[in-house]
Structure formats: C-alpha cells, structure tokens
Image (cartoon, rainbow, N blue to C red):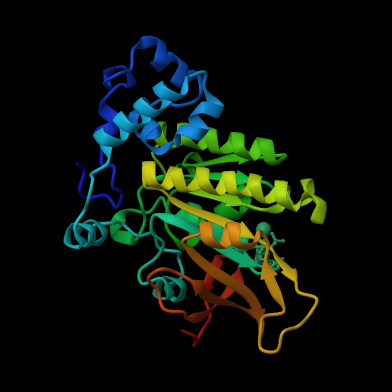
Amino acid sequence: MNSDKGDFMGGVGEEVDLEDLDGIGSSTAEKLRRAGINSVKELAAISVRELLERSELGEGKAEEATKNARDLVLPKVVSAREFLERRKNMQRLTTGSKNIDRLLEGGLEPGITELIGAYGTGKTQLCLQLCVTAQLTANSGGLNGSAFYIDTEDTFKPERLLQIVKRFGVEDDRLLDGVYCFRAINSDHQFEGLREAVRYIKEKSVKLLIVDSLTSHFRSEYPGRENLVLRQQRLNSFMHALQRLVSIYDVIVVVTNQVLDVPEIIPGARPARPVGGNIVAHGSTFRLWLERAKGMTRVTCIDSPKHARGTTYVVLTEGGVEDAEGEE
Ligand SMILES: Nc1ncnc2c1ncn2[C@@H]1O[C@H](COP(=O)(O)OP(=O)(O)OP(=O)(O)O)[C@@H](O)[C@H]1O
Ligand SMILES: [Mg+2]
C-alpha cells in the first residue's frame, strides 16, 4: 500500500493484470478492455450496473469481477489515525495566490474543486494559473506533474500561460510540454475527453485535471424544463465519472461553473445560483464562489467538508490571479 498518497487504493491495482484476478480469464479480460476497463483499480471503482451497460459480460460475471477487484485493492476499514496520517502526507497544490491558499488551508487537494462565478470573474484565469503551479516542485507548492485541460468554450490560451509563467519561474518549453488540452465540442465529446484524460494520467504523469466549463454543453444541449431530467442524468454521470477518477488516481480535479440569475430575490440571499443544481453541488467536494467586487474578485469558500466558510480578495492581472493588496 502506497501510504504517501491520499487515496485508499494505493498502488496495488497497478501491478496486477486483469487476468490475474480470480475468476477472470483471457476472454473476460478482453471484454473488460473493450469496455474501457484496463486495470484492476478501474474495475474496482465501477458499479455492476454500469459494467453491464458498457460490456458484454453477464450479471454473475460482472458481480464476481467487480467484487474480486474491490477485495484486492480496497482496504476494508481504515482507522481515523491511518486516515489522518495519509492526509498529512498528501501534497497540496498552491493556487499561486496566498490568499486563496489560506482560504483552503494550504491549497487544493485531491477531490473536485468547483469554481463558480459569472463571466469575467477569473475562473479560466485561475485554471490556467493552476496548469502552471501544478508543474512547480513540491517545495514550491506544486505537484511536479502535468495538467490536462478539457476546454469546452475555446478559452484555453497557451499565450496566457506564457504570460502567467513569468511569475513562477518554470521554463517556457517545460510548461508548454506539460499542459495537454482537449477541446470538447459537445457533451459526448466532453465524456470522450475524460477517457482521454485517464490515458494521460497513466502515461504522462498528469496530476491536475481541469474541466472548463463543466456545465455549458449540458446547458445548451438540454434547454428548458422539458429536458431537465435528462440533462441532470447526464451531468450526474459526468460527475460520477470525475469522482471515480479522483478515487482511482488521486488527482486534483477543478471544474468551472456559471451562475444563473434568480428571478425572485429572496431577502439576504445571493441574487444568483450555480448551474447544475444539487447534482453538481453534491458532486463537488470544495466550492469556491468568485464575484466581482470593487474592481477585484472576491473569493468565498461556500462549501467544504473541512474548511470554515471564509472570504478573500484577488485581482486579475497580466500575471494571472494575484493577491489583492492589503486584503487577506
Ligand atoms: N492579459 C491580461 N491582463 C490583464 N487581465 C487579464 C488578461 N487576460 C484576462 N484578464 C482578466 O481576466 C478577465 C477574464 O477572466 P476569465 O476569462 O477567467 O473569466 P471567466 O470567469 O472564465 O468567465 P466566463 O464565465 O465567461 O468563462 C478579463 O475580463 C480580464 O479582467
Ligand atoms: Mg471562462
């Protein structure tokens, strides 16, 4: 078990071939690979129901295979002490803003962090900046890894990376070779981007996955109330796929999300709400809300299982997302 990582699967599943699992012969392994399941870890994380949908396996075989995979790679129970030890050793990712890092008690961690905000509040700028900081060494708050960017709005700009990197001292060539972009033209393609990301996580030491934006394709392809159920189902599948990716590969996932104006203003409430309703709200681990305020961007941690609700301020500059002077 690889104890210096935050995940609970450790490295076991990587060394064992699918064929080596009890009850899996070469023909079952072949069917699994055709369904896009290439490792014991991936098999352990998939539900029987989804496996039945994706593969030609019968129910009995699907149940047996997933159970045997789970038995191999997942510890049954972990004590709070072990849990805490693993988290202590976990590398956090600096956002490049001390203010936001402070809000998150040291930076981003494995899980899904959602950046919520209206247009122009800096969601994309922060994502681009994270592609730079991910490549820093651990001593400088980075992950010494690459980034994979699923771009749904054609806003991924390598030129911007080159401006932002000046603040961080990573070489231009190294930076550009360590950020992979997948331009997703519709929601089906966005799912495909996720499958592609898995390949890069395994082969190119990708440690950070960005989905910018998570919701825009789903929103435009399934408009109106009549499509709401279907849209939420699809969004739910996407969120589940992201969560699975986090638990299998221990990556940091950052997604962006727009806000909708709320017609009826509830006194004291924000006059906007994030797209995607409960599906996205419950699927994200950490939620940061970005708003324009006094020429700055106010960042509020609105939801986290461990951080207190807090607020800080940053500014958008040529160098990226920087701390607002005099603000904490
Ligand atoms: N080169 C630059 N120099 C200074 N500021 C910049 C530069 N590039 C972008 N910005 C700032 O970033 C803002 C755009 O932010 P960003 O693209 O992150 O918005 P967003 O939150 O992703 O919006 P959307 O919801 O439309 O995607 C610009 O309005 C500007 O203030
Ligand atoms: Mg954007």
Q: Nearer the viewer, residue 8 or 139?
A: 8
Report whether 271 appears left or right of 60. right
Report whether 186 appears left or right of 239. right
Instruction: Please tell me which residue is depicted at 40% across the width and 31% down the height of the picture.
Output: 203
In this rendering, the answer to whether 218 lies above or below 49 is below
Looking at the picture, how far across and down is residue 14, in whole percent?
A: 29, 30
Instruction: Please tell me which residue is depicted at 38% across the width and 39% down the height of the picture.
Output: 205
Instruction: Please tell me which residue is depicted at 46% across the width and 72% down the height of the picture.
Output: 100
**Which quarter of the rendered image does ligand 2 occupy?**
bottom right
Looking at the picture, how far across and down is residue 232, in whole percent?
A: 67, 51
Looking at the picture, how far across and down is residue 239, in whole percent?
A: 55, 49
Report whether 276 appears left or right of 15. right
In this rendering, the answer to whether 156 lies above or below 45 is below
Instruction: Please tell me which residue is depicted at 43% across the width and 55% down the height of the picture.
Output: 111
* Numbered circles on residues, count: 0
Res. 54 in view: yes
In this rendering, the answer to whether 293 lies above or below 106 is below
Report whether 229 appears left or right of 202. right
- Hey, which quadrant is residue 293 in on the image? bottom right
Q: Residue furthest front?
A: 60
Looking at the picture, how far across and down is residue 261, in whole percent?
A: 76, 72
